[in-house]
Image (cartoon, rainbow, N blue to C red):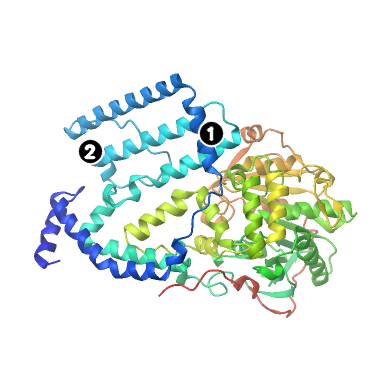
Amino acid sequence: MSVAEKQEDLEQISAAPFYPDPFALGRILVDVSRRSQPLARHFLETYEDTLKQTAADPLNLRQACLDFMTHFLSDPQKLADMQMAFYQDWMRLWQESARKFMGEATTPLYAPEKGDRRFLAPAWEESALFDFIKQSYLLSSRAIKTAVAQVDGIDEETRLKLDFYARQFVDAIAPTNFLMTNPEVLQETMKTHGENLLRGFKNLLDDLERGGGELAISTTDYGAFQVGENLAVTPGRVIYQNELMQLIQYDPTTKSVFRRPLLIVPPWINKYYILDLRPDNSFVRWAVAQGHTVFVISWVNPDKALAQKRFEDYMRDGVLAAMTQVEAATGVSDCNLLGYCLGGTLTAITLAWLAAEGQVARVASATFLTTMIDFAQSGEMKLFVDDTQLALLDQEMAEKGVFPGSVLKKTFSLLRANDLIWSFVVNNYLMGREPFPFDLLYWNDDATNMPAAMHSFYLRKCYNENRLPVPGGVTMDGVPIDMTAVKTPCYFLSTKEDHIAPWKATYAGTQLFSAPSTFVLAASGHVAGVINPPAKNKYCFWSGESGSNPEDPDSWLADARQSEGSWWPHWAGWLAAYGGGKVSARTPAKGIESAPGRYVQMSLRPPDQP
């Protein structure tokens, strides 16, 4: 492109701030296409075989869509009414948009939902063209979702699948996701003469190469973080390890500590350092500063050699083995347990096993962070675990020995597609920018595998069959598990916007145990609502009277008291009652190696591309 042409295009930007001259834009796109062809050829030659693979239908959506169309067309009158309503809505939008095109003041008929950040650019309001594009999209999205919600004759499971698919579809076709209908991308394209698109195409190819031919969208600057250097840096020692885990004991920062130690059981779907990110938002560091002797299980990232490890193995060689080592390190025969997500589910099973074995006294209290025990209301995650999908998963895991962590990450991302997928598509590929360094997203991408035997049990017995609430519904090493036998005092922390463990599902845990339970609901989601240090004075939480947990979660919320800031001090006050008094601080033995240890360094993420 000549200097004169570039100067002419710059003038077009000033003349048409919301939609550029099509001839200037066309020249830029032709230039971008020519310059990007060598990159495209290289990728296609490298990953030709991968791209030929046929996509499966793991959600069995073909049958769900067929059922929908069959029932949708079976009521011609209802179909006609919906079509007429849609036509009338379009006519009103056309009329209002025509008035705006003529320069008249108008009131938007359709506005984005609260929290939808896709349409924040001024052009979506100020430009009649882009305002019409936005509102037509919102109108069509609403019509699609309404059709799914109102069709009669389909079962609830099929309706949930269709609703999920409909949201994935309308999120994917948003005008923000395309060059020609996104004013910010158009402006950037004209301003940089298409360099944003070239950078974005290079970013796209880099992400495809990171995924071995499958798209692995970069969500953060991976070079900005290193576990053991600026993440997971709370001082401590690995004092024990076996095939499944390393046990970390942290250095004290107070002269005296609570007599009873605190053992943290994190999920093994992700790595433990979500609780020990940077020093200013580390839950572990904060708990140590409150006077607790803190131990954390760091799970191994399993490979095919551990394919046959069962849920029982995670209980026996994980929690129970760690409890034995904690007692040896402190000389105290009982401890306080804290389980997060799947680690909390394992903690609940362990408590029931201890009750059945007459070993209740080994645990003084239990804290559950965003933990499901009763999976009846487990939300959209259940869409991925019907019988058809479980059969496919079993076949895949039989070949690989594990359920790949990368697949789990994609599943979680689909639950919040606008935030975790499409926002990065726009930023990385259309705007040509690098993702912002963010510790939570670095951790989120640091995926872990799941052993085949354990994962199959978890999906079937918990999600698919919901056997944990049933006395004797599952057995651990031949011992029937009965949640009603648990009498350990419990603290339940859930988060209001949790898309992985919906708070009403986690609340159901308070109804299972024969124990006094304190339930607290924090604002925000599954991770941000938990990792909320007091110093940031962020979000809020709701709490009720200890032990006063009605069956209906909405009734609990109606009577709950709202408090500003972090839930951490509230929990610390509750846990202090089970601390067992104070003793001199304990320094960990030399052990095996310094924290964070080797197991947490086992990364599945390919090296960052240059």
- In this rendering, the count of numbered labels is 2
Q: Position of residue 36 (x, y in %)?
A: 28, 66
Residue at (59% x, 69% y) in the render:
232
| Camera-side residue of 49 and 588 | 49
Is residue 251 toward the left or the right of residue 146 in the image? right
Circle 1: residue type: Asp
| Camera-side residue of 331 and 24 | 24
Q: Position of residue 504 (x, y in %)?
A: 64, 40
Q: Return the residue found at the far top.
A: 77
Residue under label 1: 67
Q: Which mark's residue is nearer the viewer, 1 or 2?
A: 1
Query: Residue 128 has which mark?
Result: 2
Is residue 104 toward the left or the right of residue 478 in the image? left
| Camera-side residue of 163 and 510 | 163
Q: Residues within 10 Å of mark 1 (few under 14, many from 20)?
A: some
Residue at (45% x, 34% y) in the render:
145
